Image: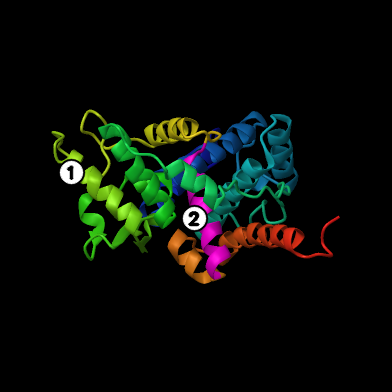
C-alpha cells in the first residue's frame, strides 16, 4: 500500500491479531498500539510511502528520537519489542521480506531490584484491628495479596466462585489470560471470611469478591490509595501493592529456595523473570553473613 498513513492500517490489523488470536490483555494491546503509533507518526513525517523505504537507519533514528524525548530505557525497550513483533507479523503475512528492526538492540536498563518489605514490616502493616467495614475489607485485600503473591489487577478481578476446596485455593486469571491455582493462607482466609460477613450486608449486583462503598467491584486505584493510607497509619512509609507481591516472593525464596514453585505461584511464563528474586535473596544472605561471621565485620 503506497500511500500516506499506510503503516497505521497494518498496525490496526496487528493489534486485532494480538488481541483476538494471541489473546493478549487489553492493557498489553493498548501499550503496543501507543508504541507503534509513535513509529507510524515518525515514518509519516519522513514522507515514507512504502515499507521498502524503512531501513534499519530509520529505525535507529526513531529509537534516537525516543531518547531525545526523555523516555526511560525500559520503556524504549518495550517500544522496540512492539516494533519487532509488528514487523514479524508483517513478514509472516508476506507484507515485507525482512524486518528493518532485525539488528536494532534495546538500550540496557539499570538493574533496579524490586522494593520489598521485611517480615517485620509486613507484621507491622497487618497488626491492626479493623474498626470499620472498609478496614475489614482492606485487611482481607492486604492479607490475600501477601498470602498468594497476587498482582493488584488479579486481586480486584477475583469473583466469589474463584475459590476452591473450602477457600484453601484460588483460581487466578493472570497475564495473557493464563489461569493458575494459588494457595490461600489461614490468615488471609480468616480475613476474607470476616469481610464476607460484611459484604453480604451490602446491596450489590456483582459477583466480585471485593466491593467499594457503592456495591461495585473495587478499582485498582482504590486499592493503591487504601494501601498507602493503611501503611502510613501503621507508621510505615507509603507502600504500593506490588511491594507485597515482591515481598511474598522474596520471603518464600528465603525460606524454601524453590525458585520453580515461586515461578508457578507468581504466574511467570519464564523462569528468568523470577530470577530477579535470587539477587534479593543473595543480598539477604550477604547481610546475614556480615552480621554473623566474625571475620566479615569491617
- Whether residue 247 is situated above or below residue 32 in the rendered picture: below
10 Å crowding of disc 1: few (<14), some (14-19), many (20+) = few
Q: Position of residue 9 (x, y in %)?
A: 47, 40
Q: In the image shown, does 123 or 226 lie closer to the viewer?
A: 123
Residue depicted at 44% across the width and 55% down the height: 149
Q: In the image shown, does 68 or 9 lie closer to the viewer?
A: 68
| Pointer 2 with pointer 1, Cβ within 8 A | no
Q: In this view, does 287 lie to the left or right of 297?
A: left
Residue depicted at 32% across the width and 45% down the height: 140
Whether the magenta-drawn stretch holds residue 240 is answered as yes
Q: Distance between the residues labelled 2 and 1?
A: 27 Å
Q: Name the residue under label 1.
A: 197
- Whether residue 261 is situated above or below residue 80 in the rendered picture: below
Q: In this view, does 91 lie to the left or right of 100?
A: left
Q: Where is residue 64 in the image (x, y as percent from the top left)?
A: 74, 37
> Considering the numbered disc 1 on the image, is that residue within a helix, a strand or a loop?
helix
Residue depicted at 51% across the width and 38% down the height: 239
Whether the magenta-drawn stretch holds residue 204 is answered as no
Q: Can residue 6 be seen in this view?
A: no
> Considering the numbered disc 2 on the image, is that residue within a helix, a strand or a loop?
helix
Mark number displayed over residue 248: 2
Image: magenta residue range: 239-256
Image quadrant where residue 189 sits: bottom left
10 Å crowding of disc 2: few (<14), some (14-19), many (20+) = many
Q: Is the magenta stretch mostly helix, strand or loop?
A: helix
Amino acid at each position: 500500500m503506497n500511500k500516506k498513513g499506510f503503516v497505521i492500517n497494518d498496525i490496526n490489523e496487528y493489534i486485532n491479531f494480538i488481541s483476538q488470536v494471541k489473546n493478549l490483555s487489553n492493557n498489553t494491546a493498548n501499550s503496543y498500539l501507543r508504541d507503534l503509533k509513535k513509529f507510524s507518526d515518525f515514518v509519516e513525517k519522513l514522507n515514507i510511502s512504502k515499507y521498502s523505504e524503512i531501513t534499519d537507519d530509520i529505525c535507529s533514528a526513531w529509537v534516537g528520537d525516543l531518547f531525545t524525548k526523555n523516555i526511560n530505557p525500559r520503556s524504549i525497550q518495550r517500544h522496540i519489542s512492539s516494533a519487532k513483533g509488528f514487523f514479524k507479523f508483517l513478514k509472516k503475512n508476506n507484507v515485507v521480506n525482512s524486518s528493518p528492526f532485525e539488528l536494532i538492540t534495546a538500550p540496557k536498563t539499570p538493574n533496579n531490584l524490586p522494593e520489598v518489605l521485611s517480615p517485620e514490616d509486613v507484621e507491622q502493616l497487618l497488626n491492626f484491628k479493623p474498626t470499620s467495614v472498609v478496614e475489614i475489607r482492606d485487611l482481607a485485600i492486604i492479607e490475600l495479596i501477601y498470602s498468594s503473591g497476587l498482582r493488584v489487577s488479579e486481586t480486584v478481578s477475583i469473583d466469589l466462585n474463584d475459590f476452591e476446596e473450602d477457600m484453601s485455593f484460588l483460581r487466578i486469571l493472570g497475564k495473557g489470560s493464563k489461569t493458575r491455582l494459588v494457595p490461600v493462607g489461614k490468615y488471609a482466609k480468616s480475613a476474607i471470611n470476616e469481610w464476607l460477613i460484611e459484604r453480604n450486608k451490602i446491596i450489590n449486583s456483582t459477583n466480585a469478591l471485593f466491593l467499594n462503598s457503592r456495591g461495585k467491584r473495587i478499582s485498582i486505584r482504590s486499592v493503591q490509595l487504601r494501601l498507602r493510607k493503611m501503611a502510613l497509619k501503621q507508621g510505615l512509609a507509603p507502600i504500593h501493592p506490588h511491594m507485597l507481591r515482591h515481598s511474598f516472593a522474596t520471603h518464600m525464596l528465603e525460606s524454601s529456595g524453590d525458585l520453580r514453585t515461586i515461578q508457578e505461584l507468581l504466574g511467570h511464563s519464564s523462569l528468568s523473570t523470577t530470577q530477579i528474586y535470587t539477587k534479593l535473596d543473595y543480598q539477604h544472605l550477604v547481610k546475614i553473613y556480615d552480621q554473623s561471621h566474625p571475620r566479615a565485620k569491617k
